[in-house]
Image (cartoon, helix red, strand yellow):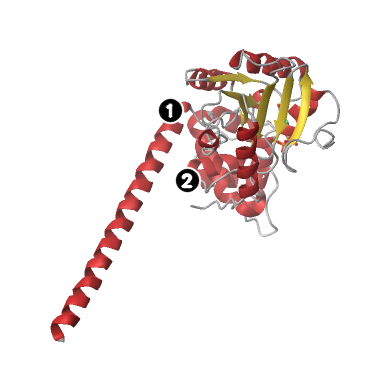
């Protein structure tokens, strides 16, 4: 696993979410990155908020492939107690659509006596502060003037009978799906010290070659696309990442590609499909089962060896 992402505060965030569930929670908003709507979804969140309806918000849709965004919306909308919408966090009208969707998910709540209590979660950099600012209509994300039930939690009153709770911090176990790690890193969600930019850029090139080859060619003026590392080298040449002797500095080329991708300069690109994500999840689960079976077998063998030794020792006596 090349990417080691250990966001801080995991335990305190988990506790804050548990406290919110206990204090009262009607809808969970999970803010996803529309460029990676599977990899940016938190595998632990559903378990902590069981039974609560979920609104998946695919943010940064302006950077994602519209056809793929439709496919992901259909995928999430087909799940029980789940709705999905796509938006750009900075735009007011779509942000209001979020309020409507929450009200539809919990139709019995939302007045003075029974306020609608909504929690918002999302990975770093997904646009949560931007969205909250848009919803609240002022520089709200850091005011803290409406404390929630824990020190971590912030409460915003979006409209009459509608409370939004923000629990900063991250809830993420190890990244079990290797491809998800690459996508999260390419998107900018993971701090740059936690991964090798060249490796992530090569993975990005592999996805782009498979799905959007013409974008890669157009952006860097490449007549054809060879092996992944030769494409990265060609990007380096185009972007002036050569040292005096003529060799290309591959890490500079990687950095240039990642910056371009994050800024949307390669066009609207989605890195994964619902089908791919399902296959990666299956593979990761199978790998985990295999590992657990191996560990169990090793434990059993060890136990047998030790009991063999013991009976040999008592036979000696
Ligand atoms: P947070 O860490 O989740 O609170 O993320 P921020 O709200 O600070 O946003 C991270 C970056 O993403 C900022 O540079 C935002 O301007 C940018 N951003 C947020 N929402 C959108 C969006 O819908 N589209 C685009 N293109 N950029 C966005």
In the depicted view, which residue is nearer to us: 208 or 107?
107
Q: Residue at x 52, y 22 (%)?
A: 72
Label 2 crowd bin: few (<14), some (14–19), many (20+), radius 10 Å: some
In the depicted view, which residue is nearer to us: 252 or 159?
159
- Hey, which quadrant is residue 181 in on the image? top right
Task: Write down the residue under mark 2.
Answer: 176
Which callout, 1 or 2, points at the residue further toward the start of the chain? Answer: 2
SS at circle 2: loop
Q: Position of residue 14 (x, y in %)?
A: 60, 43
Q: Position of residue 204 (x, y in %)?
A: 55, 40
Q: Is residue 156 visible?
A: yes
SS at circle 1: helix
Task: Write down the residue under mark 1.
Answer: 275
Q: Is residue 264 above or below residue 115?
A: below
Q: Are marks 1 and 2 in contact (CB under 8 Å)?
A: no
Within 8 Å of ligand 1, the CB of disc 1?
Answer: no
- Hey, which quadrant is residue 243 in on the image? bottom right
Q: Marks 1 and 2, how far apart in space?
A: 17 Å
Q: Which residue, as the protein is rendered here, is positioned at the far left?
A: 315
- Ligand 1: give its quadrant: top right
**51 on left or right of 315:** right
Q: Position of residue 96 (x, y in %)?
A: 73, 16
**36 on left or right of 153:** left
Tag of residue 266? none
């Amino acid at each position: 696993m090349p990417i080691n992402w250990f966001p801080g505060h995991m335990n305190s965030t988990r506790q804050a979410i548990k406290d919110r569930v206990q204090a009262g929670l009607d809808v969970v908003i999970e803010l996803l990155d529309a460029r990676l709507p599977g990899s940016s979804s938190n595998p632990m969140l559903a378990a902590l908020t069981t039974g609560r309806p979920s609104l998946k918000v695919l943010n940064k849709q302006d950077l994602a492939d519209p056809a793929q965004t439709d496919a992901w919306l259909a995928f999430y909308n087909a799940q029980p107690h789940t709705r999905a919408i796509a938006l750009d966090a900075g735009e007011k009208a779509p942000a209001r659509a979020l309020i409507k969707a929450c009200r539809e998910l919990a139709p019995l709540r939302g007045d003075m006596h029974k306020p609608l209590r909504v929690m918002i979660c999302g990975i770093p950099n997904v646009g949560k502060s931007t969205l909250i600012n848009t919803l609240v209509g002022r520089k709200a994300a850091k005011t803290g003037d409406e404390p929630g039930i824990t020190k971590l939690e912030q409460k915003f009153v979006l409209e009459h009978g509608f409370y939004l709770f923000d629990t900063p911090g991250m809830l993420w176990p190890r990244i079990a799906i290797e491809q998800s790690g690459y996508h999260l890193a390419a998107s900018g969600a993971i701090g740059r010290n936690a991964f090798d930019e060249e490796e992530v850029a090569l993975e990005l090139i592999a996805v782009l070659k498979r799905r959007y080859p013409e974008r890669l060619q157009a952006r860097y003026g490449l007549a054809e696309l060879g092996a992944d590392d030769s494409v990265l080298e060609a990007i380096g040449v185009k972007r002036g990442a050569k040292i005096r002797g003529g060799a290309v500095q591959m890490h500079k080329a990687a950095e240039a590609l990642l910056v371009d991708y994050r800024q949307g300069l390669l066009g609207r690109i989605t890195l994964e499909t619902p089908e791919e994500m399902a296959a990666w999840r299956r593979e990761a689960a199978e790998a985990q089962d295999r590992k657990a079976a191996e560990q169990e077998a090793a434990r059993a063998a060890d136990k047998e060896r030790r009991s063999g030794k013991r009976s040999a020792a008592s036979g000696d006596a």
